[in-house]
Image (cartoon, coloured by chain):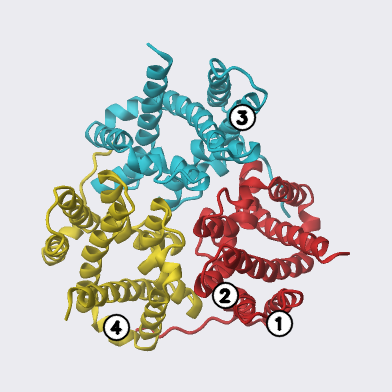
Chain colours: A cyan, B yellow, C red
Amino acid sequence: MSVHTLFVTLDILGVFAFAISGATAAMQRRLDLFGVVVIAFVTACGGGLVRDLCIGAIPPAGLSNWIYLAVAIVAALTTIGAYRFVERLAYPVLLFDAVGLGLFAVTGSHKALQYGHNTEVAILLGMITAVGGGVGRDVLLNRVPVILQKEIYASAALVGASIEVLGEGSGWSTNWLPWVAMSICFVLRMLALKYGWHMRWVAMPRD
Amino acid sequence: MSVHTLFVTLDILGVFAFAISGATAAMQRRLDLFGVVVIAFVTACGGGLVRDLCIGAIPPAGLSNWIYLAVAIVAALTTIGAYRFVERLAYPVLLFDAVGLGLFAVTGSHKALQYGHNTEVAILLGMITAVGGGVGRDVLLNRVPVILQKEIYASAALVGASIEVLGEGSGWSTNWLPWVAMSICFVLRMLALKYGWHMRWVAMPRD
Amino acid sequence: MSVHTLFVTLDILGVFAFAISGATAAMQRRLDLFGVVVIAFVTACGGGLVRDLCIGAIPPAGLSNWIYLAVAIVAALTTIGAYRFVERLAYPVLLFDAVGLGLFAVTGSHKALQYGHNTEVAILLGMITAVGGGVGRDVLLNRVPVILQKEIYASAALVGASIEVLGEGSGWSTNWLPWVAMSICFVLRMLALKYGWHMRWVAMPRD
């Protein structure tokens, strides 16, 4: 499998995992068929859409490349048609989701650099690519975004995006840099899941 | 009445109906004068604003063409000043709303094609033009967007946008194509209202 | 102190005040460290981000200029680390917030004019620059935006932006015009606070 094929495969797996997570959340809120597809699509492509608007990539890839919509629809229909099976998939879904997180953080920041933007823009937009869809899902489902309450999700994306951007800025080889950045993001996220880091809330001083 | 005049008239009626729907919802949440105007404007122009950002039409027409803001303000003031009368208008408002839905689906997808975008982008943005304002209204009013819970509203816009885009792609005459696309969207929506299709929820499998 | 230095200083004070207001609201919702920083940043820079997307200023200044992010982080950490002290700061925060409101209304509309947009676009985007961040904060915190419920906040920004835009259109000197526009917005807001205008709700007719 060539590097390109692998990247495309991982990209689709990431979209699929994000879309499953969106569809599952939408079903828990008892949305209808259309609502489940929309939330699946927004969760998978919303972050990339915001990134593309901010870097001037018109039209956003999520709208112009049919494969994203198709994968989101398949994921939504899968979730609806096999809800109990998908529920049993919880661990694989979390795994794909972590892969998607790492991949989107890296590809998002890479795309921002390719469009000629600076380090800060690229890092921030890499993170936004990875977590923006989940924020859109939560806003549409009328709840406070979970990433603002659980620390090691967006932080992992931030680390992945930073490694990619600083590495590219240092002229490191792009043959292995994306893999390192993505892997560190992925491992951070999986460790956070395994050790329950995402369950810990930073205690806020209050009166 | 020329075709152009008719189009402009329908456009303004659509904006007016959408703005009335927004203002009514805002009043039910007991927002103040400013809030009612903002929600009316967002409901009427929010979808077009997102479309314009996605196709690179800068600045968005909703901001640059004063007629939209003026119509939204008139609709908001009408709703406030004659709330009981507007309530009795329920059927005409739903009628205008369905006209607006069809019109915005068609003109939104047509504008995306004019900016050189592909079939998928045009269909999706046609639908987003028609329903995006209602989503914005519901997000600002802190509730799950109704279009994610009622199936035949956005679906009708999707059908209208698809007919317009596929028809233009097939080289059909633009003299009657928009009317066909708009009418089918309108009829679908009115049938859904008449037969209560929008009241049916797709039963979701749950544990 | 030169005019430029003064403008930059006021700009940073405005960002700081908006960020403090966001961080305080986020802490009241018991978000974690990451959530508090995000809400602080969105409150301070969200309005400018929407303005920049609408006028075609790519990438948005809030993402590309590190000083905004740095100030937002400092404000968030200050709020977390000295919550009781910040609470005692209520009056200075409201003061800075009113300064920020006036400043952002004026600089936002000025930037839209500089990008060649018309009067309506500039006035609307001046207001959106000033109040958009607070709307984003409230949407993310899952509540109806306060500016839709309290009348004299956004209205003051609208007045400030209108004076700036109409003044520039009339060829008035830009040496003192921004100060007049900003001051009127600031005074309106402070008077509204002092006399409790923001506590009054317009009574809506209801059945």
Three-letter amino acid code at the position of disc 1: Leu
Q: Residue at x 48, y 31 (%)?
A: A104
Real-space Cα separation, disc 3 to disc 2, in angstroms? 43 Å
> Chain ID for label 1?
C
Q: Residue at x 20, y 78 (%)?
A: B92
Q: Which mark is residue B86?
A: 4
Give whichever of B167, B186 is nearer the camera: B167
Rate crowding at label 2 as few (under 14), some (14 to 19) or many (20 or more) other CA atoms within 10 Å: many
**Which residue is tagged 3?**
A165
Real-space Cα separation, disc 2 to disc 1, in angstroms? 14 Å
Three-letter amino acid code at the position of disc 4: Val
Establish if C159 lies above or below A88: below
**Which residue is tagged 2?**
C150
> Can you give x and y, in whole percent of width and height, for residue A37 in the image?
29, 43
Three-letter amino acid code at the position of disc 3: Val
**Which residue is tagged 1?**
C191
Mark toward the start of the polypeptide (2 vs 1): 2
Q: Residue at x 57, y 34 (%)?
A: A113
In front: mark 3 or mark 2? 3
